[in-house]
Image (cartoon, helix red, strand yellow):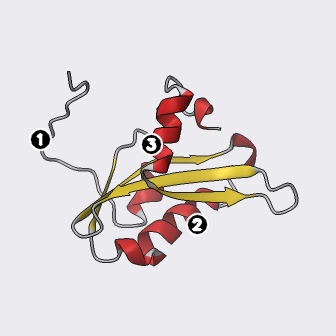
């Protein structure tokens, strides 16, 4: 499913599996078929910060509020993340994240793309 996402389409399967196994993972399944229709993961130190990433709802199931429920559960109800700062990087559906107090960051940010 993540291969369809612009931000994960070039990841190889090994990288995706390693990322998932080292994260808090959240999934939404269709009841009748047990088909995976939504996914998100969180990277955290459990005390000061978490990074919400790889939020994805299958195209067939979009527009039904599943993305909203997935983010809502993680941000508002996940006890492991209560009271700590959340970060995410996105170029779309910003209005979804704004509902949960995420706001555009106006600070300088540095990123190490490839640690050689």
Q: Nearer the viewer, mark 3 or mark 1?
A: 3
Alpha carbons under labels 1 and 2: distance apart: 31 Å
Instruction: Describe residue 31's horizontal placement relative to residue 36 as left or right.
Output: right
Is label 1 in a helix, a strand or a loop? loop
Determine the residue positioned at 47% across, 32% down.
15
Is residue 6 in view from this perspective?
A: no
Marking on residue 59: none
Question: Which residue has dot 2 on it?
Answer: 69
The numbered dot on residue 19 is 3
In the rendered structure, are the residues bearing label 2 and label 3 in contact, judged by CB atoms less than 8 Å apart? no
Q: Is mark 3 on a helix, strand or loop?
A: helix
Neighbours of disc 2 within 10 Å: few (<14), some (14-19), many (20+): few
Q: Which residue is drawn at 49% across and 27% down?
A: 11
Tell me where residue 103 sits by quadrant. bottom left
Q: In the structure shown, which secondary structural element does the residue marked by tag 2 occupy?
A: helix
Q: Are marks 3 and 1 in contact (CB under 8 Å)?
A: no
**Which corner quadrant holds the N terminus?**
top right
Residue 108 screen position, x and y as percent: 11, 41
Could you tell whether 25 is left or right of 52 in the image?
right
Quadrant showing the C terminus: top left
In the drawing, does residue 35 fall left or right of residue 4?
Answer: right
Residue of label 1: 108
**Is residue 75 toward the left or the right of residue 70 in the image?**
left
């Amino acid at each position: 499913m993540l291969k369809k996402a612009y931000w994960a389409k070039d990841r190889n399967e090994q990288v995706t599996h390693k990322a998932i196994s080292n994260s808090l993972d959240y999934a939404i399944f269709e009841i009748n078929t047990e088909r995976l229709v939504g996914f998100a993961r969180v990277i955290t130190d459990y005390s000061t910060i978490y990074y919400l990433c790889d939020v994805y709802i299958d195209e067939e199931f979009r527009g039904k509020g599943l993305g909203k429920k997935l983010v809502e559960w993680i941000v508002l109800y996940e006890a492991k993340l209560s009271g700590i700062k959340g970060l995410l990087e996105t170029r779309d559906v910003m209005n979804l994240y704004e509902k949960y107090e995420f706001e555009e960051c106006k600070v300088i940010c540095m990123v190490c793309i490839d640690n050689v």
